[in-house]
Amino acid sequence: MKKQFPALLLALSLLLSIPAQAAQTAAFARSRSYDGSFSDLTPDSPFYDNVAALYEYGLASGKEDGSFGLEDTLTVGQAVIFAGRVRSLYRTGEAEAAAAYRRENAPAALAYLRYLQAEGVLEPEFAEEPASLYQPASRAQVAHILAGVLPEEALPPVHDELVAAAYATRRFIPDVNETTPYRQDILDLYRKGVSVGSGASGAFRPGEPITRGAAAAMITRLADPELRVRPQWDLADLPSAAGTTLADLVEPGSYHISPANQEELESSLRHMLSQGNEQIVFYYPLLSEAEARRLMNQALTVIKAHCEQGYNEVRCTRGAGLLTLSFSAAGAGNRTQEYRTAAMEAAIAVHDRLWAEGALRSDMMELDKARVYYDWICANCAYDYQAGDDSLSHIPYSLFANRTAVCDGYTGAYNLLLKLEGIDCSTVIQGDHIWTMATLDGTEYHIDTTWGDSGNTVSYDYFAMTPQYSRTVHAQQSA
């Protein structure tokens, strides 16, 4: 079965639901008031509210010397203890459910570890060697320890779309990639308002140790929605094709009332398309019926070179030397313009989604972008073997709306996406087959999305073909 994007519109923020907040507030209650007892915690500390909340929730009492140890390095064991207390408080209303797991002469952290493992928060193999509990915790390890402490209903991903879009651009959270340990857990902390990283880019610094003060900030955001944070990332310049019209995608031509050659005819039809019109009037007072039909066929061939426009048939009316050509989509009736608009909106949504997801990036060559769209077309369409001459599968609309098309529908949708990237492209027509001709990074290529999607997997044999190879392959297949 071919893959489909479940949604094409990007929302950059989500609201935290009232029920989730209410449940979270009920689960965590502050049992005491902070009295300023930590010697190293002053009101101007960036972690003052967090450490005070940690104390008030009964999650920490500080060190024997009367300090909290703001700048001390957090150990793996301490992170486990904090996480165990948060889990216990959520599940039982008390912070010390792990007491049942304590064993004589065993490290205190081991009891909390066993508790978290029994609760399914941490995997059985985590910290297999007890000595590792005394090691400094990396920020990535802390993310892993905290990520599963609360269920999603208590800690919802309120910034899911924002973080996904920002991370995909590679401008934000730049030091977390596919090889980063606990990558998904780190991203979850951003999505749930537990972390915003540091600096304008929101870097997480996954391999660095974490201080107790910084850890307190993350831990208390689990318990208190009021302490959670939202990334202040500007995505205003994220590439968007919103507002682009089909007329914008045509290089304007000049109108000739009586085109004397193919060049003038093509220029006149480009003028029509660039003006957003579907009719054009020519003046030929002496044109015969056969010549009028020949002109119609020539005009339709030109229009099919712009198959992304969604026109594939032409009607002609004559009178007083005027010849009016009206273009439409076969089988669309009076809904041609509706289908054209819908196809354009869908293509814009695909364009914006792929940019937001990071599949398309500004550092990519045109060839790479063309391949991304090639993959998308092949993953989101099936060939319509039942299509007749008047089927909507001949226009881009069907591919976007119905996920079915034939060659001109495939090619029209693909060319529409390429043109949204500013890529110069047209079509090659050979017999009853049509495919794309595009200039990518200054080189002309032929691309046949229809044949690329002819098997169970995407075939790249028909992507970025040289014109000579393309014509040879197509001639052999048609023989």
Image (tube, rainbow, N blue to C red):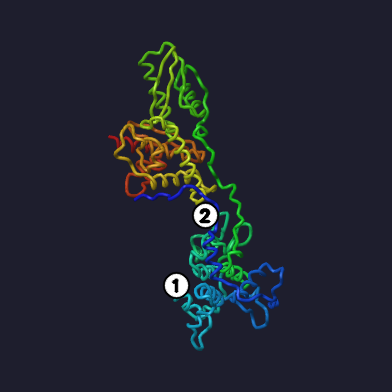
Residue located beneath label 1 in the image: 120
Amino acid carrying label 2: it is Glu
Dividing the picture into quadrants, the one containing residue 36 is bottom right
From the viewer's perspective, is residue 337 above or below residue 127?
above
Q: Do the residues labelled 2 and 1 touch (CB within 8 Å)?
A: no
Q: Where is residue 336 in the image (x, y as percent from the top left)?
A: 42, 32
Please name whichever residue, 7 or 476, is drawn nearer the observer in this view of the structure. Answer: 7
Q: Where is residue 113 in the image (x, y as percent from the top left)?
A: 49, 77
Is 328 left or right of 216, judged from the image as shown? left
Please name whichever residue, 418 or 150, is drawn nearer the observer in this view of the structure. Answer: 150
Is 338 left or right of 210, judged from the image as shown? left
Please name whichever residue, 471 or 4, is drawn nearer the observer in this view of the structure. Answer: 4
From the viewer's perspective, is residue 76 above or below residue 439?
below
Element on which disc 1 rests: loop
Q: Position of residue 156 (x, y in %)?
A: 51, 62
Is 299 left or right of 42, judged from the image as shown? left
From the viewer's perspective, is residue 196 above or below residue 72?
above
Position of the C terminus, as image quadrant, is top left
The answer to which of marks 2 and 1 sits earlier in the sequence is: 1
Residue at left offset 48%, top offset 28%: 273
Residue at left offset 49%, top offset 26%: 272
From the viewer's perspective, is residue 206 above or below residue 3?
below
Element on which disc 2 rests: helix
Q: Which mark is residue 275?
A: none
Amino acid carrying label 1: it is Gly
Residue located beneath label 2 in the image: 161
Near mark 2 (Cα within 10 A), the count class, few <14, some 14-19 or many ≥20, is some
Dividing the picture into quadrants, the one containing residue 32 is bottom right
